[in-house]
Image (cartoon, grey):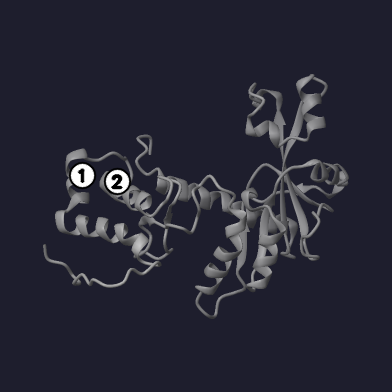
Amino acid sequence: MPSSSPATLGRPDPKLTPRAGLHLVAEVDRALGATSTLDHHIGPVKTRRRGLTAGELVLAVAETMLGGGDFMADLGNQRADTAGATLRAVPGDLGSGKSDPRPQAPGLTARAVGALPEGLLRPVVRAGSGFFDAGVARAALKDGADYAVVAKRNPAAWRACRDIPAESWRPAIGMGAEVSECDYVPAGWPPATRCVVRRVKVGYDELRADPRSRRRRTIDPGQLRLLEEGETGFAYAYSFVLTNLRGDVADTEAWSRMRALVEERIKDSKWGLAMAN
């Protein structure tokens, strides 16, 4: 079959040979129209245009698995521009989706910051609790970026949170919550680190009976016990963000919270075949 570029035989390149299957899948699709054929026979599966078609998803999953990825876990958007917004395999960059992402974070940070064009404001590495590690913050500073990392809730964070003066809480921006700061800074984090705290009021009727529910884990254990025993009508769910950003606490928390919206967009794209969408 015709090809846009002739095949060349030679010594195997250890950087390219393991990824040859990705090129083969793309060539099969180009030559045989696999994606369009699948779309034609499967038909529409969504009620909105965001995300992939059925054929595009099958192609992306095939590329991912050929690249050593873990089914859906290693699909990602290669670039933010229009041409690169389609989900394709990103082999080797994001791990299996089951492994600890923190060891890979410094390398990904360096690559991402290095790819930014000149003339932008100082970048900020914004990360969830899966990247809660001092090494992530230090890597961001090394690469000329600031950081805002969601901290995991632990006894030290709870102790610091309990010491926040009642009068220091103030309304959060854009949601029914309050924000403040506490003096929780784990060992090894950069000296300029501050801890921004958000709390949301939770009533007993909002708790799930399942002790593994995420909502329960966000409440101070002491408050949770009182709430369950009927000693109080409500408790607070807390979130902690470690950052070196120096702005107003409410502005900083609101900006950090936007990470959740980004995650929702990525999740929506990966699972673009959801019937309810």
The answer to whether marks 2 and 1 mark residues whose Cβ atoms lie closer than 8 Å is yes
For the question of whether residue 50 can be seen, the reply is no
Say which mark, if any, is on residue 241: none
Q: Which residue is mark 2?
A: 58
Q: Assign a secondary structure to mark 1.
A: helix
- Left or right? Give the position of 217 relative to 275: right
- Left or right? Give the position of 69 relative to 5: right
33 in relation to 121, above or below: above
Q: Which residue is mark 1?
A: 38
Amino acid type for the residue under numbered disc 2:
Val
Label 2 to label 1: alpha-carbon separation:
9 Å
How far across and down, in percent of the image, does residue 226 sit? Answer: 81, 25
How far across and down, in percent of the image, does residue 100 sit? Answer: 59, 49
How far across and down, in percent of the image, does residue 170 sit? Answer: 77, 49
N-terminal of the two: label 2 or label 1? 1
- Residue density around tag 2, few if under 14, some if 14–19, many if 20 or more, within 10 Å: some
Of all residues, the one furthest to the bottom in this rendering is 119
- Residue density around tag 1, few if under 14, some if 14–19, many if 20 or more, within 10 Å: some
Most foreground residue, 185 or 174 = 185
How far across and down, in percent of the image, does residue 18 sit? Answer: 36, 60
